[in-house]
Amino acid sequence: MATSTTNAQAGEGPSPQPDRQGAGPRLGALLHRLDVKGAPYAFVAPFFVVFAAFSFYPLLYTSWISLHRVELATLDVMEWVAFDNYVELWNDARFWNATANTITIGVISTVPQLLMALGLAHLLNYKMRGSLFFRIASLVPYATSVGAAALVFTMLFERDFGMINWMLGLVGMDPVNWEADKWPAQVAISTIVIWRWTGYNALLYLAAMQAIPADRYEAAAIDGASRWKQFTHVTVPGIRSTIVFTIVLSTIGATQLFGEPLIFGQGPNGVTGGADNQYQTLGLLLYEEGWKNYQMGRSATVAWAMFLLLVLVFVAQRLIKRLRSRTS
Amino acid sequence: MTTESLPVRTDAPARTATKKPAARGGRRLLGQRAGRQHHAGPLAYVLLTVTAILSIFPLYWTMVAASTDNTRVSQTPPPFLPGPNLFSNLARAWDEAAMGKAMINSLIVAGVIALSTVMFATLAGFAFAKLRFKGRNVLLMLVIGTMMVPPQLGVVPLFMMMSELGWSQELPAVIFPTLVSAVGVFFMRQYLSEALPDELVEAARVDGAHSLRIFWSIVLPVARPAMAVLFMITFVHAWNDFFWPFVVLDMTNPTVPVALTQLSAGYVRDQSLIMAGALLGTLPLLAMFIVFGRQIVSGIMAGAVKG
């Protein structure tokens, strides 16, 4: 873009060679054409340059590294090991454990989150007083960082003096060991995710709901559809592409889950995802291999496994969708 | 979720071919009556109030815990009302827990990232929305495609790259990879295709203005509201970004989320101090949401997928 400015200015200024002064207007036209043709590329270039350097290249290079043995202390020494990292990962129980945890936490956090967001959006869509307040209030968790949110919830889920066990005690239930037991830990971690993202997703749904034409509701009402029928037959189909979009985003987020379990495990137990890896996700395993066991090659292999998992989930989604549309 | 995930309206021309036109009717811009407008009953108010309490309570309790002391926090029943130590705990967190340095670092990181994202996104968004050039649609599809790539996958090479550049533990390592955002480009493109009339660009062209001049005097004034929203949302994401800063920075030079993990990992756990740190790290964003809440809400909704 800088070049287009200087070029244009040069075109307006006096030409350095007197005998070519007649070429002024033609030069101007040339520069104009150059500007019209070139400027768009100059405008979009910064995005592609930065993306190529810091996202695309690392992504490709990850696969090259995963075929080597590289240690954190000596990053420039790369020893070719072909597919050894992949074979070891395949035979590693921790990998399958982390994959299973990533999937279960992903399901426990995504499904309730999106269902609740749908309900919340429906409520926010009513005409009412204080609607702006309710909208901003549901966005407050989104403004809270993973760090702060995970720290508070870790305290709320504390075994001995945490508020949640205290409230369970009030209704006569035994305290739950939220950190040490597998399923409670996964539920607690999912709670953090759900808390942070429900309101945000609800606003996306709300925006889509407001774009549904009113006459479709009127037509449904004339056909005698109940409020619930209207919700399932007009509202939900009307916002389908938004729902797909949020499913995609949440799935990507779920495969990458890292901060919540790390902080929930509080320091020493964080990276391993609990004393028995009971809530270690693939994100944590990636970090553990690379920055705790100093094996960058293996870490890159885990990254590829995460990517593969993501692809598999989307392929599965596609298949389910196709099967369902065929049966219906 | 560390991926920046500003919502995007995907009913862009690039994708409309796959959609029934009827499904996208009722844009509110047309003044058409859209959406259901029933009045809320008492039950809706009750449910919304409960949701609001659930959304706000953890933050309120952060404040409560940060204002008492360690012994009070570890008693049952837990405290529900603020104690007297809020400011002394905040001051301790600022000094002892490196929160002061972390706040300044985060301000720099989030500020630079938000500024550059807005600038480059507006430039590229303008080109995609209003300029004609070969390969425009292909490039736009590429931009959209890049949104599907989780940034975490490239951390190992990125880390190696940063140590080669001598940037590990330095702020540029966090800033450079996120200088641009695909979501931002798409957001600005959507906004400008609707808000910027073609005639305005044509007229300026006829008057002999070159592209950068058009961008400066015509596009920027029109784009300003969307730029403000994009700035705030990018700022929030950059401030809260966790995985990559955690990998590449250390405790001597952390951002806020990185410093917070250190707070919790200490061997002597001072719960009030931890909560004071968490509160401190959240306050700037909270203040922004209180002042600009309306704009942020409408920005997120304006960018949402519709239809």
Image: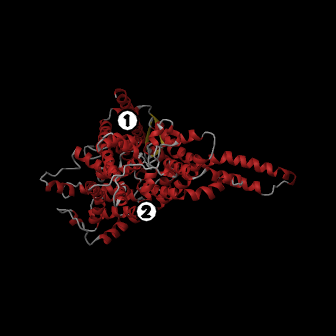
Chain letter for mark 1:
A
Residue drawn at (25%, 46%), measured in percent from left and top? A187
Residue B145 in sight:
yes
Under mark 1, the amino acid is Val
Residue drawn at (35%, 70%), measured in percent from left and top? B91
Residue A258 or residue A143, whichever sits in front: A143
Residue found at the very far front of the displayed protein:
A222
Query: Element type at marker 1?
Result: helix
Q: Distance between the residues labelled 1 and 2?
A: 38 Å
Under mark 2, the amino acid is Phe
* Residue annotated with mark 2: B292
Left or right position of B1 against A32 = left
Asked if B86 appears above or below A318 in the picture, the reply is below
Give x and y (percent) for residue B167: 50, 53
* Residue annotated with mark 1: A313
Give x and y (percent) for residue B59: 31, 61
Left or right position of A284 against B119 = left
Location of residue A15 by image quarter: bottom right
Name the front one of labels 1 and 2. Answer: 2
Residue A64 or residue B42, whichever sits in front: B42
Work out which quarter of the rendered image holds the C terminus of chain B and state it.
top left
Query: Element type at marker 2?
Result: helix
Residue found at the very far left of the displayed protein:
A172
Same chain letter for marks 1 and 2: no
Left or right position of B174 against A193 = right
Give x and y (percent) for residue B57: 28, 60
Give x and y (percent) for residue A31: 73, 49
**Mark 2 Cα shell of 10 Å, populated few (<14), some (14-19), many (≥20):** some
